[in-house]
Amino acid sequence: RTFEMDPLNGMDLSTFQSQVLWALIVGIILAFILGFGMGANDVSNAFGTSVGSKAVTIVQAYILATIFETLGAILVGYSVTDTMRKSVVDVSIYNDTPKELLLGQVATLGGCSAWLIIATIFSLPVSTTHALVGATLGFTLLLRGFEGVIWSKIIQIVISWVVSPLLSGSISSVLYIIVDHLVLRRENPLEWGLMLLPVFYFICLALNAFMILFEGSPLLHFNELSWWVCILISLAIGTVAALVIQFIVKPRLRVKLSPANTVDSLDTKKTAWDDPEVGGASEQQQKPVVNIPQPTGCLGFIKRILPDRSRVEDEKTLQLFITLQLFTACYAGFAHGANDVSNAIAPLTALVALYKGDFDQTEGTPIYVLLFGVFAICVGLWCLGHKVIRTVGTHMSAVTPASGFCIEFGAAMTGLIASKLGLPISTTHCLVGSVVAVGSIKAGDGVKWGIFRNIAISWLVTVPGAGLISAGIMALLRFAL
């Protein structure tokens, strides 16, 4: 239903646009601030573990984030945008007052961006998804009360906030236990790691390819592919990757990690897991892996399943996982772009649609809006991303390339599954859930629970905090109606 089909008080579209042009301009500015704050906060979470484990430098993390956040938003992120801008509140209640809905999007952008900037100043990793939901509810509760709020969708989103860290943490911890049994606790972990490296790459790339292709981007016509075609293409991609690792990468790694080539670098290179400040073990503390007999019974079975917390990991084997974590870092960036970038630009997408007269918002998300959101996010990442990276990457738990690979894979897989289902989950919750789960069971120091407590408190106050700011902005904007 366009503006021409339902004129408001005899006003035509051009007159309406002239009256709300200022709101569109303000909304665009606030959307940029929101993306800036999100880049400094959420994206920093996604790449924090990679920087903390020394798999990538901070500059390399910025470059990878720029590339893969963009790809994730364009190829997968369209479905989440529709959920955030249409399913939280029934926009039809504003059919007769489109100006209210337009100003409501401005209030949403203002409330969310203000909350993200406040959180970033205090180095608190918060959820943009939470802030957007809270800000959306804030303005509509002020204007219409509980009318139009789609509570079933709100409940679904709230449940996903709890389920997402649990699911992500479960995937990551199970994967880490598998890696521990197959590689890390072996008598010759480096050889086992080299042998299984093609398998790890096959699984990661095949799953990632399937998540991209199945019901994928209409822009690239991926949505026209049948499920079995997606499976065949994904298996082919995984197979090619495994062959490349087996016959090209493995021989080079074997030479690079041989004793003659690694002794000097191991003596001089300081890494995240041997830094006392992040709870790792120093070189003087390293010792051969000793298999200690475990008791009989249920307790003994559990102890045999879980990693030995007193074990010091073989450093050359951990270096082997750096190559795999380089991929999972990109994977995490893609998943973040697929979910959170779309969340951030959802109010701006609605704002543009309303300005154009599409009050039912039947049109899809314009590609230029997605790109604008990515650009703002990347600017924030490059300017302030270092502030929050340390919280997840080093302060909460010591991260090695092996544990970092499992953390990022579990968080990214959970994010991509949620994107396919149209659930705007929190990537921050996924990543923190994985860090806590893996940090609780892996060898070495565990989780610094005081830092996790502060993060959990920031999660609880995000929805009401952003909602109150949004409602306050909307109260001021009502004078413009």
Image (cartoon, rainbow, N blue to C red):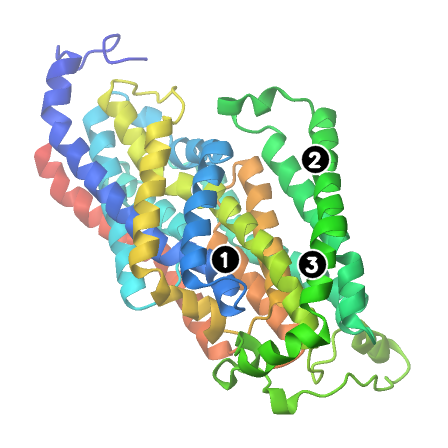
Identify residue for label 3. Answer: 252
Q: Residue furthest bottom?
A: 284
In the rendered structure, which disc, 2 or 1, sits on the residue that comes first in sequence?
2
Is 277 on the left or on the right of 365, as rendered? Answer: right
Structural distance between the alpha carbons of marks 2 and 1:
28 Å
Q: Do the residues labelled 1 and 3 touch (CB within 8 Å)?
A: no
Label 3: which secondary element: helix
Which is in the foreground here, disc 3 or disc 2? Answer: 3
Identify residue for label 1. Answer: 429
Structural distance between the alpha carbons of marks 1 and 3:
37 Å
Identified by mark 3, the residue type is Arg
Q: Which of the 4 image quarters holds residue 286?
A: bottom right
Label 1: which secondary element: helix
Identified by mark 2, the residue type is Ser
| Residue density around tag 3, few if under 14, some if 14–19, many if 20 or more, within 10 Å | few
Structural distance between the alpha carbons of marks 3 and 2:
26 Å
Label 2: which secondary element: helix
Q: Is there any visible trace of residue 31 in the rendered image?
A: yes
Q: Position of residue 271 (x, y in %)?
A: 54, 76
Q: Where is residue 185 in the image (x, y as percent from the top left)?
A: 78, 74
Please give the name of the residue rendered at 60% of the width and 28% of the height, measured from the top-left corner: 215
Which is in the foreground here, disc 2 or disc 1? Answer: 2
Is 118 on the left or on the right of 284, as rendered? Answer: left
Q: Do the residues labelled 2 and 1 touch (CB within 8 Å)?
A: no
Q: Which residue lies furthest to the right in this view?
A: 296
Please give the name of the residue rendered at 76% of the width and 61% of the height, measured from the top-left corner: 194
Q: Do the residues labelled 3 and 2 touch (CB within 8 Å)?
A: no
Identified by mark 1, the residue type is His
In the rendered structure, which disc, 1 or 3, sits on the residue that comes first in sequence?
3
Q: Which of the 4 image quarters holds residue 411?
A: bottom right
